[in-house]
Amino acid sequence: MELKVIISGYGKMGHMVEARLKARGIDPVAASEDICAVDPAVARECICIDFTTPDAFKANYKFIAANFKAAVVGTTGWNDIKDAVTAEFLAQGTPLIYASNFSIGVNALFAAVQKASAVLKGHGYTPAISETHHIHKLDAPSGTAKSLGAIVEAEMDAVPEITSFREGEVPGIHTVEFLSSCDKLVFTHEAFSREGLAEGAVAAAFMTEGLTGVHEFKELIV
């Protein structure tokens, strides 16, 4: 598969995605801060990898759905319009893969927490989640922490408390704890850089070949 990519958002994550593509011998067709300015004729041959802001994605998703071959969206904070986004991509017949976190390690964490939550349900365990990120991160809790919370709630019928910390330049630490009167079970994922997010997003771009519909990344790799 010849992968043609246009990066939407050319900040830290956009640059990281570009680096991971080049490590695979792929030069992005473009990297744009204004994805709606891309020529639709060019877009039709390309996959859009989006790491922007919630407001930018909300403004741009209809253009992306209407004009791109497929989309990989790592932007979070648009869950309030998830139904509308899903409907738009389905209506346009444009494959979409999205994730609160594209790290392969974090998606392994999702799977482990899902299994543990199911096993521990009804046995007196109280779940709790904490997340730590750099001081520049605007949202709290993180999208990853919210996803972990949703997994625990669905499997245990219990809503975990989520605690957020903002410290220095920490790329990201997520911890899920299950505490009972007998013992404690802890799962932790610590990112050393944003590189894992970029690598997962590039892997997702390859997955779009022959794909139809709208999918969360963790459903495709677990």
Image: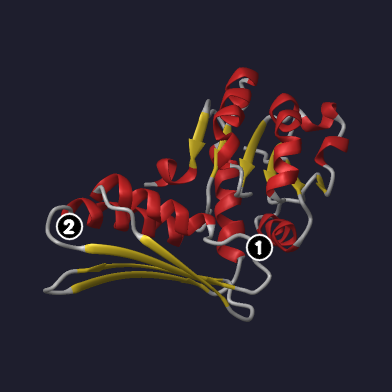
**Which of 168 and 189 lies nearest the eye of the viewer?**
168
Q: Is residue 138 left or right of residue 7?
A: left
Q: Is residue 160 left or right of residue 49?
A: left
Q: Residues within 10 Å of mark 2 (few under 14, many from 20)?
A: some
**Which of 91 and 103 lies nearest the eye of the viewer?**
91
Q: Which residue: 75% across, 27% down?
A: 67
The secondary structure type at the circle numbered 1 is loop
* Tag 1 residue: 138
Q: Which residue: 60% across, 65% down?
A: 195
Q: Which residue: 24% across, 55% down?
A: 117
Amino acid type at image mark 1: Leu
The part of the image, by quadrant, that contains residue 110 is bottom left
Residue 138, image x, y percentages: 66, 62
The secondary structure type at the circle numbered 2 is helix
**Which of 110 and 76 lies nearest the eye of the viewer?**
76
Which callout, 2 or 1, points at the residue further toward the start of the chain?
2
**How far apart are the alpha carbons under marks 2 and 1?**
33 Å
Q: Which residue: 75% across, 47% down?
A: 7
Amino acid type at image mark 2: Leu
The mark total stands at 2
The part of the image, by quadrant, that contains residue 123 is bottom left
Q: Quadrant of the N terminus?
A: top right
Residue 169, image x, y percentages: 64, 78
Give the foreground label among 2 and 1: 1
**Which of 67 and 4 lies nearest the eye of the viewer?**
67
- The correct choice, above or below, for 222 with respect to 20 in the image is above
Residue 98, image x, y percentages: 55, 42
* Tag 2 residue: 120
Residue 5, image x, y percentages: 72, 43
